Image (tube, helix red, strand yellow):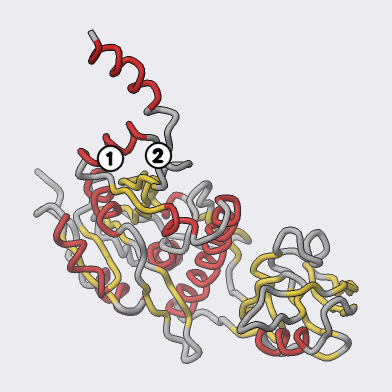
Amino acid sequence: MILAFVVAVIAPAGYFIHLPYYSVGPGPSVDVLDLIQARGGAKTYPSKGRLLLTTVSESINTVNVWDAVLAWVDPNVTLIPEQAVLGGQTSREVEIENQLEMDDSKYQAEVAAFQALGLNVTPVAGARILSVVEGLPAFGKLRAQDLIVSIDGVKVKDPEGAIVLLQKHKIGSTVTIGFVRGRSTRTVRLKTAASAPVKGKRHALVGVNLETAFRLPRTLDVDTENIVGPSGGMIIALSIYDTFTPQDLTGGHIIAGTGTITLLSNGQAVIGDIGGIEEKVRTASAHGADIFLAPFDQAAAARKVAPKSMKVIGVRTFAEALKVLKALPPLAKAS
């Protein structure tokens, strides 16, 4: 009787007691080929296979006691310390950062794919705004994709030049920024704010994240909906390439993959490591993938959890990933 009473009291409490952990497991996957919409009448080509962007499923909040118990007994679910997920940020700040990383990933993927297609991708003088930080002076005045072309009348050549000019200002002083939005050139005056301390010092900023600007030969939308983070870069780039070339990269295969994509100054697009490689392999397996492309240094970990029916291939660059897919034999149809 006493034991039953204790269980009856404690069991419900487990739903309200939260532990400093998040749960992570296999998430959904989407065929990126279905997400790409070309605009302006550019010719596109169909594929017989699929290019899957794999994800992980992360709990919205820290887990309660019973969630943790279920995670401990489920080999497909991992508990990750709260500090490792948030890194001292609020959950809202992490959410915003993850969305910005996806936006940047898609932009880098477009540039890499168009360059690989041999299309004319030319750098543009100025600094492209990747994002505007809420609560800082530029918020509501500047927008993502605006192109900063001058600061206080001085022409801006690239993001590094823009940062140098901004940091010459005293905190609290006024800066005049010239920028291009669409087809119009505009100016805005902003009062600078203080950065977080770096080695005990603060500098002036307005709250924009900048990147190199390019003039792209095609206009397209990649509707990744609620998927965030940078890990879809490689598979998005492959999907863009496949969309605009008559050769079917998939060969009828179901190809999954993960990896960031970063453009280097020499024009090379490198594939970087990601989080949750094991969970993403399990996601790919659940959706029937027979090929899985992984960052080279994480391929061994991916192979440990991949089924025998799935071939895991590690790649270091986007060029390597393209070479792998172009060499795939077409998938034979069952008779």
Q: Residues within 10 Å of mark 2 (few under 14, many from 20)?
A: many
Q: Residue at x 75, y 76 (%)?
A: 205
> In the image shown, does 284 or 175 lie closer to the viewer?
175
Q: Secondary structure at mark 1?
A: helix
Percent of width and height locating residue 162: 73, 85
Percent of width and height locating residue 26: 31, 46
> In the image shown, does 126 or 110 lie closer to the viewer?
126
Q: Residue at x 77, y 72 (%)?
A: 206
Residue behind mark 1 = 71
Q: Secondary structure at mark 2?
A: loop
In the figure, is residue 228 to the left or right of 242?
right
Q: Residue at x 90, y 73 (%)?
A: 189
Residue 245 appears in the picture as rendered: no
Do callouts 2 and 1 mark residues in contact (Cβ within 8 Å)?
yes
In the figure, is residue 194 to the left or right of 264?
right
In the figure, is residue 26 to the left or right of 171?
left
Q: What's the residue type where badge 2 is placed?
A: Val
Residue behind mark 2 = 63
Q: Is residue 199 above or below residue 189?
A: below
The tag on residue 188 is none
In the figure, is residue 140 to the left or right of 268?
right
Q: What's the residue type where badge 1 is placed?
A: Ala
